[in-house]
Amino acid sequence: MDIHASRTWILFYLISFVVLLWALFLTTRGVLLGFGLTMVIVIVGMNSVMVSAELKKASRRKEMMKRFSQKSEEPSENEPESMGFLE
C-alpha cells in the first residue's frame, strides 16, 4: 500500500473509533439506545466491507503481477534472440 492510501486508512479508522466511542457513550447513558446500537452495527459492517474489498483488491493486484511476470519470461516469436549492443 502506498503512503497516500495508508493515510486514508488511518483517517478512516480514527473517525470510526470516535464514532464507536460516541455510540458507546450514548448506549451506556441510556440515551438513544437504538441509535447508538445502530451506529455500532453500521460502523463495524462498513469496516468489514472495506477490509474485505481491500483484500480482494490486493489479491487481484498480486494475480495481475504474477501474470505479467509469466508473460515477460517467455520470449515472443517476433523478438530477435539477442538484442546486444555490439551486434
Image (tube, rainbow, N blue to C red):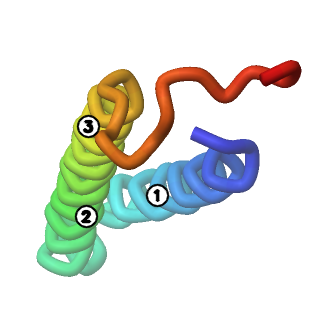
Q: Which residue is mark 3?
A: 67
Q: Which residue is at 30% across, 41% downward?
A: 77
Residue 79: x and y, percent? 46, 41
Q: Nearer the viewer, residue 16 or 37?
A: 16
Can residue 55 be seen in the rendering of this structure?
no
Q: Is residue 62 above or below residue 32?
A: above
Estimate the x, y position of residue 43 in percent, counting from the top left: 29, 62
Q: Nearer the viewer, residue 31 or 85?
A: 85
**What is the three-letter code of the residue carrying label 1?**
Ser
Residue 67 image-quadrant placement: top left
- Judge from the rendering whether residue 21 lies leftward or rightward of residue 71; answer left or right: right
Q: Amino acid at mark 2?
A: Met
Residue that appears at 24% across and 47% down: 60
Query: How much space separates mark 2 and mark 1, taking CA atoms?
Result: 9 Å
Q: Which residue position is annotated with label 1?
A: 16
Number of residues whose C-alpha sits closer than 10 Å to that of mark 1, classed few (under 14), some (14–19) or many (20 or more): some
| Secondary structure type for disc 3 | helix
CB atoms of marks 2 and 3 within 8 Å: no
The disc at residue 46 is 2
In the rendered image, residue 72, in percent from the top left (x then y), is placed at: 40, 32
